[in-house]
Amino acid sequence: MICITVLVMSLTNLRAQTEKSKEVPLDTSDFLDITGKFDGTVSDFKGAYTATLIQHNTIMEKQTLNVKKSFDFTLKKNMLYAIRIEKEGFISKTISVSTYAPNKIDGRNNYEFILETNLLSQDLNSHFNDDDIDFPVALVSYTKGCDCFEFNKAYTSTLIARMINSLLFGSI
């Protein structure tokens, strides 16, 4: 009886190890080229700004550029990133990017996401809730329906509306 129990336990352990070995490794190939620049509302910007690519609270890449130049980062598949845009005298802006996508989409499928943004004067900082300033202004992720990367319009609209209300009517 003891031999049968040991044999059954051994077979169960062997089956569990076999199932683990069938796991598909996570694809982390280059996947998304993200480019960003300032929109037309900041035509009087002068000097330089910094765009920083962050992953797991670690700076992966930092670009210091003339305000007329675009930043460009290549992101790997199945990762979470933040892009922080900073310019002296202005409120920093963060964009959150998820490159998680279905496994059937591999390294041969490279995507591009282009964004235009602006920055608000540091003088307005006291009018906003700290969370509204610290949280990402946009959440970018893969959308299966269009087979593309998009930002979450509802999230960004809600954040902007809250900030406008704070600016116009004070803290709510």
Image (cartoon, helix red, strand yellow):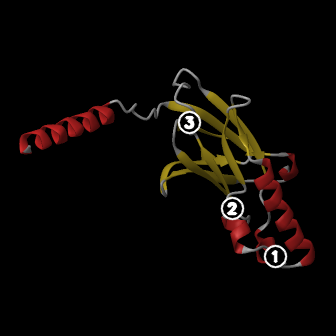
Q: Is residue 68 above or below residue 54?
A: above
Q: The residue under label 3 is which amino acid type?
A: Thr
Where disc 3 sits, the SS reads: strand
Number of marks in the rendered image: 3
Classify the position of the N terminus by image quarter: top left
For label 3, the crowd category at 10 Å Cα-Cα, with few meaning under 14, some 14 to 19 and many 20 or more, is: some
At 67% from the left edge and 63% from the top edge, which residue is drawn? Answer: 135
Q: 141 and 9: which one is in front?
A: 9
Any part of residue 45 in sight: no
Q: Amino acid at mark 2?
A: Ser
Residue 88 image offset from top left, x and y in percent:
69, 63
Q: Position of residue 94 (x, y in %)?
A: 66, 56
Furthest residue toward right: 168
Amino acid type indicated by mark 1: His
The image shows residue 107, relative to residue 161, as above or below, that is above
Residue 107 screen position, x and y as percent: 51, 24
Q: Tell me the quarter of the picture where residue 110 sits.
A: top right
Residue 82 in the image: state x and y as whole percent. Answer: 59, 52
Residue 74's disc number = 3
Q: Which residue is mark 1?
A: 127
